[in-house]
Structure formats: structure tokens, C-alpha cells
Image (tube, rainbow, N blue to C red):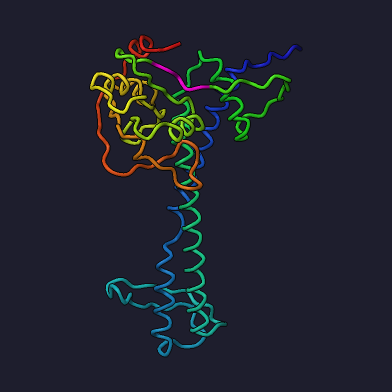
Amino acid sequence: MMMIQPTELEQVQGAMTHQLYHTQKQIEALTRATQQVQDAESFKVQGTLLQMHAHEIQPHTRTVELADYRDPQHIYIIQLDPEQSIQANAQAYFQRYQKEKRGQSVVQQRLATAKTALQQQQARQAAFDPTDAEQVTQLKRQLMAEGALKTQVLHSSKAPEPAHPRRFYTSEHVLVEVGKNSVQNDQLTLTAQKNYYWMHAGGEIPGSHVVIHSSHPSEATLTQAANLTAYYSKGRAAQQVPVDVLKVSQLYKPKGAKPGLVYFTGQARTITVRPDPALAQQLKAE
């Protein structure tokens, strides 16, 4: 039987979909883990109560009821190891407190990492243009590097040409560049002139980084660039999308931050627009 190999586009689309699904499931599992982890503070309270009332508890006791010193109306039914002293039981509760606290910290860190990864994956998917063969090839390499796509690598003596951002010219002939993925977003943002303007979909909407090659863009240019920003975001199908506007000089990237993640200082201006695919096509430079 002849096997039909998926096209490069199908490979990329399938890998992105699977990666998003996997990350979402990971977040769900970690969220459940945070809910299932017992309250670490309760172990600390029980250990403290045992120390406070050690002289009142008979040896070899299996359970004891003690009022919470923070809220006397709340009664703890504390399980004890009858073969251990009360002080040893108290220390066991303190050890459980430390273990649970460490566990909570690890789960929270993993959850935060997974949520950041999901935002970046959603932004990449939102900026994906299946008709752009250059972007498809670049994304394939990126997904392979991330382990999301396993396929045979065909070596070529010719090095691939580096992909460039999407390019548009406003009605006033101002160049606007739109990143295609998180790695390119970094390159675009971090190499832009400090007096240029930068845009991104607001309200935590995943999307492309956008750089306006002007230090004094007009309102018309800002509005058209905001439209491009909204169109190349996860809010593409929405009626209204908020777009944050900043100077590139306000942006910075923390050490160790993942590709596509930047922070800003000072205030951002917000422009609300309705994504217009016709305008995006009209302004396209190539």
C-alpha cells in the first residue's frame, strides 16, 4: 500500500494544533494539582498546636481534638502516631508543611511556565499565514527545534535565506513590519530603532509584534498600523480589538525570558480598531 506523505503545510498545521492541545492539557493537569494539594498552612498549625498542648496529651494517643489558636471556633482533629512522642509528631507535621510548601511552589512555577508557553503558541498561530511558503518553512524548523515536529531533515548544500517579517506601507508610505513568530518578534523588536513606535494587541490577546518605522507617525499611520496589529492577532475575528502603542525605547526583555516576551516601562496608549483584512491586503508591500 502506498503511503501519502503530508505536505509541509499540513505538518506545520498539525504540529501547532497538537502542541496547543498538549499545552492546554498540561495547564489543566497543573491547575488540578494546585487544587488537590492540601493546605500547607494547616500542617504548620497542627504542628504548632501539638507543641502548645504537648503536656495535656496522653502518650500513645491516636487522635486529639484541638482548637485553632487563630480561630477557636475551628477544631482540628489531629492524627497521631502512637509510637512517637508528641514532639516527634509535631515535627512530622512541620516536615509535611515544608514538603507541601515546596510542592506548591514547584507546581505554581510549572503552571506559570505552561501559561506563558500557551500565550506564545497562540500568538504564533494567530500570526500564521498558510499562504506564506517562507513562513511555513521557518515554522517547520522552529517546531522541530522545540520537539513538536519530528520529521526527516533533508540536508541541502544551499543555506536557506533568512525569513523577514511581513512588510506593509501605510497610505503615507511609512514602513510597518509585522513579526511572523515569537523568534522573529524578538528580532524585530530588539533590533528596531529606539525612537520607532511599537504595537501589540492589548488585553493579553496573543499576536504579532509590530514596528512602525517612524519617530513621529501621524494618526492615520497609527490607525492603519493598529489595524494590522489587530488583524495579525488572536482577535482577528472580533468586532473591536484594543491595540497598545509604545515607543521601542520603553521595551525591555528580562534575562532568560522566552522568545516573544517583552515588558515595558511607563504608559502605553491604546487604540481600538476593527480588524480589516481588505486593508491588510491593500497595504501589503509584497
Q: Residue furthest left?
A: 219
- 68 horizontally vs 106: left or right: left
What residue do we see at 51% from left, 38% from top? 23
Q: Position of residue 166 (x, y in %)?
A: 45, 19
Majority SS type along the magenta span: strand
The N terminus lies in quadrant? top right
Q: Position of residue 92 (x, y in %)?
A: 52, 75
Q: Nearer the viewer, residue 134 or 30?
A: 134
What residue do we see at 62% from left, 15% from top? 7
Above or below 116: residue 49: below
Residue 91 seen in the figure: yes
Residue 197 sits in quarter: top left
What residue do we see at 52% from left, 65% from top? 99
Residue 199 seen in the figure: no
- 163 horizontally vs 167: left or right: right
Numbered range of the magenta stretch = 164-168
Q: Residue furthest bottom?
A: 55
